[in-house]
Image (cartoon, rainbow, N blue to C red):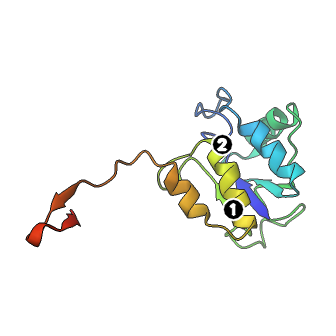
Amino acid sequence: MVIAVDFDGTIVEHEYPAIGKPVPFAIETLLQLQKDNHKLILWTVREGQLLQDAIDYCAERGLYFYAENASYPGEDREKAPRKLRADLFIDDRNLGGLPDWGVIYNAVNATVNNGNALQIMAGSSAMPEPKQRRGLFGLNRRR
């Protein structure tokens, strides 16, 4: 599976343009995903030296990407489509924010094994359960 991963707010805390503190278990989980034969793409707003800083940060921790801000190594960004070719995106700006990296790992595995990644993600939700109330004829109904 090809997985696109954001940098700021996902691998490190938001301190852009500086590099923030590490997000717990981000690097370790991404390294395990690589061991599981997934291709990782660094997909970030960073360009130029700021992109190189992010690449170097990850490389110093043993994490090397299949491609950076491209669908594949050497892709001509002038001719490439704007939409990245990836099977999955990991980004702190997802609906609901960035889940715990353990949840992310389990969701990726569920996807690979034809399971329900959304169910895993929803199971980790901090959203409260809807309140039950008595309806007509004493039946429970959701609000």
Q: Secondary structure at mark 2?
A: helix
| Residue type at tag 1 | Ala
Locate the N terminus by quadrant.
bottom right
Q: x and y percent of residue 33 in the render?
A: 81, 50
Q: Which mark is residue 110?
A: 1
Please say whether residue 90 is visible from this viewpoint: yes
Which mark is first along the chain, 2 or 1? Answer: 2
Q: Is residue 51 left or right of residue 67?
A: left
Q: Nearer the viewer, residue 60 or 53?
A: 60
Q: Which residue is mark 2?
A: 101
Asked whether the residues under the numbered discs 1 and 2 touch, taking CB atoms below 8 Å apart as contact, a structural biologist would say no
| Residue 59 higher or lower than 117, as above or below | above
Q: Image point 61% across, 51% down: which residue?
A: 91
Q: Image point 84% across, 67% down: which residue?
A: 76
- CA neighbours of label 2 inside 10 A, class few (<14), some (14 to 19), many (20+): many
Q: Which mark is residue 71?
A: none
Q: x and y percent of residue 72 in the render?
A: 85, 64
Please say whether residue 44 is visible from this viewpoint: no
Count of numbered labels shown in the rendering: 2
- CA neighbours of label 1 inside 10 A, class few (<14), some (14 to 19), many (20+): some
Quarter-of-image position of residue 102: top right
| Residue 98 higher or lower than 23, as above or below | below
